[in-house]
Image (cartoon, rainbow, N blue to C red):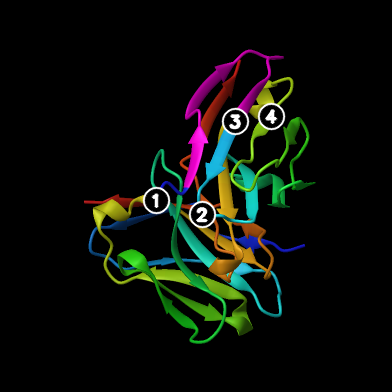
Amino acid sequence: AQSVTQPDIHITVSEGASLELRCNYSYGATPYLFWYVQSPGQGLQLLLKYFSGDTLVQGIKGFEAEFKRSQSSFNLRKPSVHWSDAAEYFCAQGAGSYQLTFGKGTKLSVIP
Amino acid sequence: NAGVTQTPKFQVLKTGQSMTLQCAQDMNHEYMSWYRQDPGMGLRLIHYSVGAGITDQGEVPNGYNVSRSTTEDFPLRLLSAAPSQTSVYFCASSGRKTNTGELFFGEGSRLTVL
């Protein structure tokens, strides 16, 4: 069975600082990987996705993620965090079917 | 575009009551699913459907029932609500045109069972 691990439950950063959220996925020949963001009281919005090609993918709101097969990782990064980025972030893995397996999420707090 | 619409947004039930959470999508997606979200647990798949007339169980199906009579609608039924079903429920859909299995989510339904 697929599994997705987000090691950090809660991260706090200062506004303007850089951010990296970690995600490790279980082995898969061709993983489809996603990062979603959930603002308080809202549904989940897709930030970015990877399924093939360039291992560095760009998403919305200035986020990017890098796929590293050797480390089974798909970490999310942003060079300068804004207060509006405070939210919960979920990494997810698919396998070509429609079902996604989600990590347990990382809550991001931003200090002004 | 409406996307995925869930109703109601909030509901309070007493133990043993039944109710249905509604989900509708207007993107002609084949795949629809229900997740529940609990603190520290992430999203867990309850039931899913790959087309009208086809449903299957996910990770946590007990206590829930689904049907898929049309492509657009995928209601989730709680037959006899229990406090353990207090949660936020999300409906999501996907279609072949998305190519990669990206899910589109509704805004969620917050259910409290007393």
Q: Which residue lies under the disc numbered 3?
A: B21
Callout 1: residue from which chain? B
Disc with the residue nearer the chain's start (3 vs 4) = 3
Residue A65, horizontal then vertical, whole percent: 45, 74
Residue carrying label 4: B77
Which secondary structure, mark 4? strand
| Among the two numbered marks 2 and 3 on one chain, the one whose residue lies closer to the N terminus | 3
Tags 2 and 1 on a common chain: yes
Q: Name the spot of residue B25 as percent of width and height, x first.
A: 53, 46
Could you tell which of marks 2 and 1 lies nearer the N-terminus?
A: 1
- The answer to whether the residues at label 2 and label 1 have Cβ atoms under 8 Å apart is yes
Instruction: State which quadrant residue B64 falls in.
Output: top right
Q: CB atoms at circles 2 and 3 under 8 Å apart?
A: no
Please provide percent x and percent y for residue A94. Answer: 64, 66
Residue B51 appears left or right of A64: right
Q: Chain of mark 3?
A: B
Q: Dot 2: what SS?
A: loop
User: Given the image, on which type of amino acid does mark 4 rest?
Assistant: Arg
Q: Residues within 10 Å of mark 3 (few under 14, many from 20)?
A: many
Q: Residue tagged by mark 2?
A: B27
Rounded to the nearest angstrom, the CA distance separating label 2 from label 3 is: 19 Å
Of the two numbered discs 4 and 1 in the rendering, the one whose residue sits closer to the viewer: 1
Any part of residue B39 in sight = no
Please name the residue that numbered disc 1 is placed on: B1
Give whichever of discs 1 and 3 has the lower sequence position.
1
Q: Which mark is first along the chain, 1 or 4?
A: 1
